[in-house]
């Protein structure tokens, strides 16, 4: 497989083989044209194809090039803002639907892996780790909240319990979600793309969309071709650019950084994470980590607002990794990369329709692996005329970032600094 167009990440290095998919040349017709072949686009396409639609996907670079092929690979339930925040701003009817959907994405991922025999190193179990008593209190509340929506695969961990799952002195406790887990995300995306093609879906890579003609039957244009469709699904997230201006005004790309160590001995790897769970802490700007299938520690964290690529990723992440695992002081970092996710002001996803036939989902705000798989199902339902769950998401209020394009980055960074300081001071 050619890795030239993927960033030099551990995932690209260990990707399963996949075909080179041709650019769009000339004219095609389809029922649904999906813009973006990441998790949102692939999930939407699969659900549509399974229900008899004809689907064409266009990606500016390659399948899973954006956040879908670069993220931490963690299957984390719920949304970036939890269900209790939704209950404060949505109607009781919509809150209930959104609460029940909060745990569906992980189930969809597992169904896809099983149904299409996707090789992506699925491992079960995820942990939220508390650094302060206040965070531990939040986890106790979260457990009750999730159980109220029928999600019962949860176990609170005390100071001894957390040390049995992660070998660090950093945490005072945690919450184990047995239905969490982790995967090789790029291989999941490549497996889903193969599933799309097995059902007759068409994927064109290196086919950046330059214009969407909004008419009764929309036309999606690239440099060398066009697709005539009945519907368009916009699934570009942080890599959409200004293609749909009304979407870019209410969201902001942000960069997150990840490193991968050299391969660790099985004994050392098992000593760090004895149950092989993935872990994320409870800070506003959180750290997250897990073991890969070949015993590397993958450790991510840090946020760069406006999605600039930092000069030295290792300098940002290595100190965080060693604070958690000083036992890795003499281990090399073999891969370091960055990827962009799309942040919304509410930190809740934005779902909706423009006119009669352009649908979109964006702005997972850091909880994308599970949400995007759910979003595909919800968008496909709406295109089939079953819009109840789509409407629940679409009803959530969204606002542009204060300061417009010029000031949204410094203002958001100031807000993050404030919350980060609160984390440090234990407020």
Image (cartoon, helix red, strand yellow):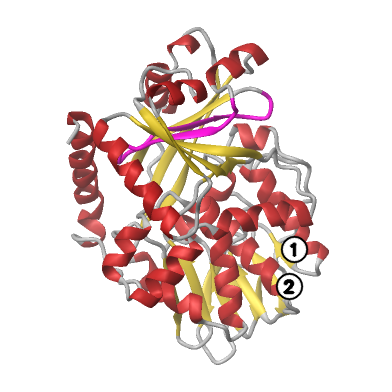
19 sits left or right of 322 in the view: right
Tell whether position 277 is magenta.
Answer: yes
Visible residue check, residue 54? yes
Coordinates of residue 28 in the picture (x, y in percent): 72, 78
Q: Which residue matches tag 1?
A: 196
Q: What is the chief secondary structure element of the magenta stretch?
A: loop
* Quarter the N terminus occupies: top right
Q: Earlier in the sequence, mark 2 or mark 1?
A: 2
Which residue occupies 76% across, 52% down?
114
How crowded is the residue under tag 2: few (<14 C-alpha within 10 Å), some, or many (20+)? Answer: many
Up the image or down, 138 lies above or below 103; here it is above
191 sits left or right of 151 in the view: right
332 sits left or right of 307 in the view: right
Q: CA distance from mark 2 to mark 1?
A: 7 Å
Tell me, yes or no, whether the two marked residues, 2 and 1, touch with CB atoms within 8 Å.
yes
Coordinates of residue 347 in the picture (x, y in percent): 34, 56
Label 2, secondary structure: give it. helix
* Quarter the C terminus occupies: top left
Coordinates of residue 31 in the picture (x, y in percent): 68, 82
Up the image or down, 368 lies above or below 386; here it is above
Which residue occupies 62% across, 83% down?
384
Q: Which residue matches tag 2?
A: 49
Coordinates of residue 8 in the picture (x, y in percent): 59, 34
Image: magenta residue range: 275-294
């Amino acid at each position: 497989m050619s890795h030239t167009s993927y960033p030099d990440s551990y995932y690209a290095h260990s990707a399963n083989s996949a075909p080179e998919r041709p650019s769009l040349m000339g004219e095609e017709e389809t029922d649904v044209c999906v813009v973006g072949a990441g998790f949102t686009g692939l999930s939407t396409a699969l659900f549509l194809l399974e229900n008899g639609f004809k689907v064409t996907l266009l990606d500016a670079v390659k399948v899973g090039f954006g956040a879908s092929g670069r993220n931490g690979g963690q299957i984390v339930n719920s949304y970036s803002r939890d269900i209790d925040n939704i209950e404060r701003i949505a109607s009781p009817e919509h809150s209930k639907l959104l609460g029940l959907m909060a745990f569906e994405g992980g189930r969809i991922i597992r169904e896809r892996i099983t149904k299409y025999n996707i090789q992506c190193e699925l491992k079960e179990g995820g942990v939220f780790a508390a650094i302060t008593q206040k965070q531990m209190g939040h986890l106790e509340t979260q457990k009750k909240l999730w159980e109220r929506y029928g999600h019962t695969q949860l176990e609170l961990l005390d100071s001894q319990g957390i040390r049995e799952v992660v070998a660090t002195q950093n945490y005072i406790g945690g919450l184990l979600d047995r239905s969490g887990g982790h995967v090789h995300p790029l291989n999941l995306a490549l497996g889903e793309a193969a599933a799309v093609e097995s059902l007759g879906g068409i994927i064109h890579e290196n086919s950046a969309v330059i214009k969407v003609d909004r008419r009764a039957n929309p036309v999606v244009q690239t440099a060398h071709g066009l697709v005539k469709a009945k519907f368009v699904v916009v699934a570009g997230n942080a890599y959409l650019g200004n293609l749909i201006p009304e979407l870019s005004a209410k969201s902001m790309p942000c960069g997150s950084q990840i490193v991968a160590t050299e391969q660790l001995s099985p004994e050392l790897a098992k000593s760090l994470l004895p149950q092989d769970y993935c872990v994320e802490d409870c800070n506003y700007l959180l750290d997250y980590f897990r073991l890969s299938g070949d015993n590397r520690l993958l450790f991510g964290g840090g946020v760069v607002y406006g999605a600039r690529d930092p000069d030295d990723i290792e300098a940002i992440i290595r100190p965080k990794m060693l604070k958690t695992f000083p036992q890795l002081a003499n281990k090399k970092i073999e891969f370091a990369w960055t990827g962009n996710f799309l942040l919304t002001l509410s930190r809740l996803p934005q779902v909706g329709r423009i006119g009669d036939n352009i649908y979109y989902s964006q702005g997972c705000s850091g909880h994308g692996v599970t949400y995007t798989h759910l979003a595909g199902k919800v968008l496909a339902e709406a295109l089939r005329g079953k819009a109840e769950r789509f409407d629940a998401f679409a009803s959530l209020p969204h606002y542009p970032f204060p300061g417009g394009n010029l000031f949204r980055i410094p203002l958001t960074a100031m807000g993050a600094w404030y919350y980060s300081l609160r984390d440090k001071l234990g407020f």
